[in-house]
Image (tube, rainbow, N blue to C red):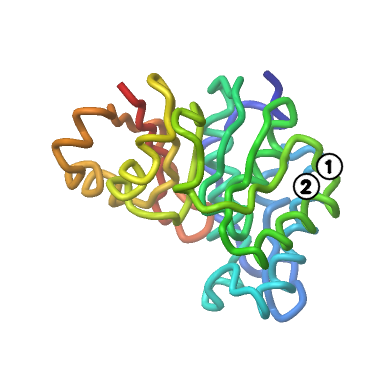
Amino acid sequence: MSTRFPPARFPIAKQDKSNAEPKADNALWRIPQWFPQLDGVLAEQLRLYHSELLKFNVRLNLVSRSTEREADEIHFADCILAGLALSKVKLDKPVYDLGSGNGLPGLVMALMRPDSQFLLVESDSRKCEFLKHMIAVLNIRNCRVLNVRLETLKSSEMSLAMSRGFANISKTLLAVNKCFTKGGRFYHLKGSNWGTEIAAIPTQIISLWSPELVSEYSLPDTQARRSVVCTTKD
């Protein structure tokens, strides 16, 4: 297994906004200041991804317009920190990013973990075209797009998956239960309310899945709390 990051360094210092690099339409790009350990090629790929995401957002509604200016923190830093939290986790089977849409976290994870395979699952054909565009532009060789609905996936097809902003944990597990193999792991990128979501999982579902907190971390500027939760199918 290889990762393009050294071990995580926590906490990340809060960045002075006066030193932030301005981008088109007043969007910020502070990733190099927050993550100086980034491989140079990876840093440039992420910068290009950010630029293309905002450009296509006008037509495709990839992220909320209210998050565009600070997408570097709200979306990219979140995925990078989640990737760091998972840097020692073995990803030896294809990882499904469900409801991928804008490619977060799947594309970021694919860039960080070039020796692992990622499948971006998205039912919206226009968003799939964006994902394919990004894979080509960023020259990502360990990632491909599946333009399918989740319910069409085969029984026991998945053993590794992740999602960010897809659905709450209960709805996610209900949706993927038939698709997952026994012992399969699902990584949920969540906010600070992950415990509430775990508590709300119905009895018939929690009897089939075991939840575990993998990591909690803070975003580098706002200090908003985020988490990675793993549910393993029993």
Q: Image height check: is 77 above or below 208?
A: below
Left or right placement of residue 182 versus residue 162 in this view: left
Say whether residue 43 is left or right of residue 98. Answer: right
Q: Badge 1, how many Cα within 10 Å: few under 14, some, many 20+?
A: few
Residue at figure coordinates x 43%, y 24% from the top left: 181
Amino acid type, callout 2: Ala
Image quadrant of residue 139?
top right
Q: Position of residue 72 (x, y in %)?
A: 63, 60
* Amino acid type, callout 1: Gly
Q: Is residue 230 above or below residue 127?
A: above
Q: Nearer the viewer, residue 45 or 167?
A: 167
Residue at the location (44% across, 48% down)? 151
Quadrant of the drawing holding the C terminus? top left
* Furthest-left residue in this view: 203
Give the quarter of the image for residue 67. Answer: bottom right
> How many numbered markers are drawn?
2
Residue 199, placed above or below residue 117: below
Label 2 crowd (10 A; few <14 / some 14-19 / many >=20): some
Disc 2 marks which residue? 43
Residue at image point 28% right, 29% down: 209
- Up the image or down, 204 lies above or below 104; here it is above
Q: Position of residue 140 (x, y in %)?
A: 80, 42
Q: Secondary structure at mark 1?
A: helix
Q: Is 146 placed left or right of 48 in the picture? A: left
Tell me residue 16's x, y (percent): 61, 62
Classify mark 2: helix, strand or loop: helix
Which quadrant would the N terminus be assigned to in this image?
top right
Residue 117 at x, y percent in the picture: 68, 31
Q: Are marks 2 and 1 in contact (CB under 8 Å)?
A: yes
Q: Disc 1 marks which residue?
A: 40
Mark on residue 168? none
